[in-house]
Amino acid sequence: MVNLPAKRIAFLAMMAALAVILGLITSPLPNFSFTVAFYLLLIDFAGFSSGWLVMLVAVLASNLRTGVGPWTLFQLLAYTLIFLLWWGALHLDWLDKRWAQTFVAALLAFSFGFWNALLNVPFYHLPHFWVYYAQGLAFDGALCLATAIGYWLMNRYLLPLLQRRVPELARRHRGQD
């Protein structure tokens, strides 16, 4: 069993609550959400497992409000694929610039609909993948735009705050995760 210190558990709980609030604030706008940007920023700050755990709690909490079904698992898998790609991209030298991170974060957010469609089409026995995927492109664009705006702002304002307030949870200082 993994031993999580109380400070890290409290941090993850607060970040999950913040992720749920970010989702609620932007819920009137279709698929315009800052949560993907928030998860990616957390992965950069506190590591893959921290970002993934926050996403898990936030997605489950959000789906309790909107309804739980197979799509919940598809969301979790799509986020996990995006997080793995992000985690790999963070090890590239050119991704140290804020504009480059924002661009990659936005592209990965745009890909969310693709990964989700890949999982939904076979499950629901839909006849045409590309037709199903194309119907969601406007929503993918909204998520891409929201992620670009959200990541830029959070990287500029939230990340320095986290680094000042909880430096011991930063993955770069721990050298792990």
Image: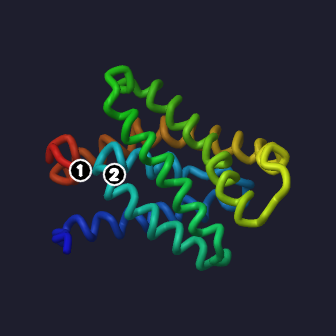
Q: Quadrant of the N terminus?
A: bottom left
Q: Could you tell which of marks 2 and 1 lies nearer the N-terminus?
A: 2
Disc 2 secondary structure class: helix
Q: Position of residue 63 (x, y in %)?
A: 60, 73
Residue 71's tag is none
**Whether residue 58 is situated above or below residue 65 in the rendered picture:** above
CA distance for labels 2 and 1: 6 Å
Nearer to us in this view, 50 or 115? 115
Nearer to us in this view, 121 or 30? 121
The picture quadrant where one finds residue 137 is top right
Question: Number of labelled discs?
Answer: 2
Evaluate if marks 2 and 1 touch, with contact meaning CB atoms under 8 Å apart: yes
Q: Residue at x 32, y 22 (%)?
A: 93
Q: Position of residue 124 (x, y in %)?
A: 76, 66
Q: Position of residue 32 (x, y in %)?
A: 67, 50
Amino acid type indicated by mark 2: Phe
What residue would you read off at disc 1? 177
Q: Badge 1, how many Cα within 10 Å: few under 14, some, many 20+?
A: few
Q: Is residue 32 left or right of residue 57?
A: right
The picture quadrant where one finds residue 148 is top right
**Whether residue 120 is situated above or below residue 93 in the rendered picture:** below
Amino acid type indicated by mark 1: Asp
Q: Is residue 78 left or right of residue 168?
A: right
Residue 48's tag is 2
The picture quadrant where one finds residue 89 is top left
Q: Residue at x 60, y 62 (%)?
A: 74
Q: Residue at x 53, y 43 (%)?
A: 150
Q: Residue at x 62, y 42 (%)?
A: 111
